[in-house]
Amino acid sequence: EGLQFDKGYVSPYFITDPERMEAVLEDPYLLLVGNKISAVRDLLPVLEKVMQTGKPLVIIAEDV
């Protein structure tokens, strides 16, 4: 159950379960980006809104 990606994490800091080497997030927001993310400022409005909710955010992008 769930999704698996071939590329993995951008950073090991995303891992929430070090024993299983998984990032387990409860009820996260999901942001799908169809191109490379080159500047955080482009995402700031979304990041600020999500931060106000206190929920985790998963960003899936071609490249960062």
Image (spheres, grey):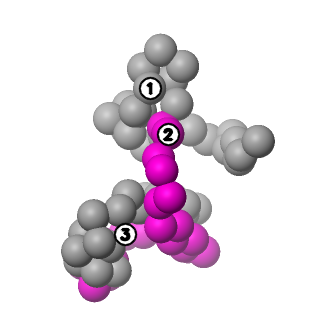
Image position of 33 (left or right of 5): left
Q: Quadrant of residue 45?
A: bottom left
- The C terminus - image quarter: bottom left
**Residue at mark 3:** 38
Distance of label 2 from label 1 (alpha carbons): 7 Å
In the image: residue 52, left or right of residue 36: left
- Residue at the disc numbered 2: 24
Q: Which residues are magenta?
A: 23-45
Mark 2 and mark 1 residues within 8 Å of each other at the beta carbon: yes
Q: Residues within 10 Å of mark 2 (few under 14, many from 20)?
A: few
Against 8, is 17 above or below?
Answer: above
Image coordinates of residue 9 in percent, x first then y, are 48, 40
- Magenta stretch holds residue 10: no
Q: Is residue 8 shown to the viewer in this render?
A: yes
Please give the residue where the numbered disc 1 appears in the rendered image.
17
Under mark 3, the amino acid is Ser
Q: Earlier in the sequence, mark 3 or mark 1?
A: 1
